[in-house]
Image: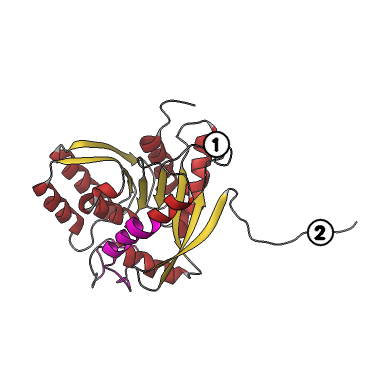
Amino acid sequence: MEKPIYSKQEVSIRGTEVKQIESKIVEGMSYELHITLPANYQQSKDSFAVVYYLDAYYWGGTVIETYRLLRAYKEIAPLILVGISYENASNYDAWSYRSRDFYPTVITEVNKGNADNMVPPLSGGASKFLEFLDKELKPMVSENYRTKETGSGIFGISNGALFATYVLFTSPGSFDKYLIGSPALYSDDFVTLRYEEEYYARNKQLPASVFLSAGSDDFEEVKVSWNKLKDRIESRDYEGLNLATHIFEGENHMSGIPATISRGFRELYGNVTKE
């Protein structure tokens, strides 16, 4: 009996393009983009809201396939997904770059509750990364795809949630919708909550939709972060803010990621009109 013939090749995610963008703002950095278009994009003339999701290097496939499953039953609106990753990066490089991009301040000691138990090699670049998003990435996406001016979202988990929280309180108009999952806000003595204090001193409005989640078995400092952020936002009674929160029972920092993405899509982009 003849042996079966097989070949070996990399698996790609259908319907997703990989592109690069070289930043002039984040000096010397080339980002890899994972761009997923709605299934009917080529056949329609419609414009679509854009979701920018962080850490595509780690869970980009989870985001894309969750979106596709939810779209199968039209539970969420059709969207353009833009995952932000790092070109030709090792695991160490990806950790270094995300630490640089997501931490608002320079970290010089190990964060209590940090699973890595290490001082990140790079940090303090959140302002530059936000400028890259606003001035380089979003214009590039709008120039090349049919995008809506409203409904843009940012999805961040763990340190990505730290960055999303930073954006929410320093530049809330950058996005309309925020997924903040398992937020690791404890760096630099909860600096993002100080940004919230500064924002609230000047503004009583916060026009945004926010989904805030964590797992019941998450790191203790993450659960503290979740509670602090939830309590702070709810105490403010911001005008124009739509806040949804959830604790996923039995889920930890990693296992809660698929649940957060699925619930976050539905909370923020639920297809109320049902096509």
Question: Considering only order in the chain, which callout, 2 or 1, is on the residue closer to the N terminus?
Answer: 2
Q: Amino acid at mark 2?
A: Ile
Q: Secondary structure at mark 1?
A: loop
**Quadrant assignment, res 195:** bottom left
The span shown in magenta is: 110-138
Q: Percent position (x, y) of residue 113?
A: 28, 60
Residue 230: assigned label: none
Is residue 267 located in the magenta-colored stretch of the structure? no
Q: Callout 1: 10 Å neighbours few (<14), some, many (20+)?
A: few
Please name the amino acid that badge 1 sits on. Answer: Ser
Q: Is residue 9 left or right of residue 225?
A: right
Give residue 1's position: percent from left, percent from top. Answer: 91, 56
Query: Which label is found at residue 44?
Result: 1
Q: Is residue 69 above or below residue 57?
A: above
Residue bearing mark 2: 5
How far apart in space, not on screen, are marks 1 and 2 (Cα)?
Answer: 41 Å
